[in-house]
Amino acid sequence: MSRTLKKKKHWSGKVVECAVSWGNLGDFGTVVEVLGGAELGQFPYLGQMKLDVLVCHVGKLPYYGDVLLEVNGTPVSGLTNRDTLAVIRHFREPIRLKTVKPGASPAFFLQTLPPAAVSHEPPVCKINL
């Protein structure tokens, strides 16, 4: 018998690109908070944003928590927070951002499991000779 398998959608189909400018209010870091980074073992992601200042020219504005993949075609995944901000400062406005919504975190799965299923102890193997 053959089974038909459901194809799972790849995350790359959910990537959103937008061109953003913020006027004469300083650099991007004063308008959009960039959090995470390689020094924390995370991808860089977007924090608080001043939506009344940001102008989206192409695409749609990213949301709080979206993972930052590229800035003007330069990949920023794997960079530290400081390096990510340096890449952003390097470019003039408007800048093109590629973002993606984060997937479910492992903490979510741990919360859904019953307490007995989550054990931080290594399994004990007993061998009877």
Image: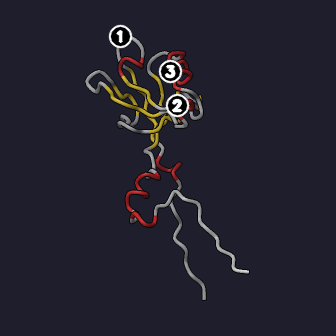
Q: At 54% from the left edge and 18% from the top edge, which residue is drawn? A: 86
**Is tag 1's residue or tag 2's residue first in the polypeptide sequence?**
1
60 relative to 128 in the view: left or right:
left
* Quarter the C terminus occupies: bottom right
Mark seen at residue 88: none
Q: Mark 3 points at which residue?
A: 85
Vertical position of residue 60 compared to residue 111: above or below: above
Q: Mark 1 points at which residue?
A: 24
**Circle 2: residue type:** Gly
Q: Which of marks 1 and 3 is in front?
A: 3
Q: Residues within 10 Å of mark 3 (few under 14, many from 20)?
A: some
**Circle 1: residue type:** Asn
Q: At 45% from the left edge and 50% from the top edge, which residue is drawn? A: 105
Q: Could you tell me residue 27's position as x and y percent?
A: 42, 14
**Circle 3: residue type:** Leu
Which residue is most to the bottom? Answer: 1
Q: Mark 2 points at which residue?
A: 37
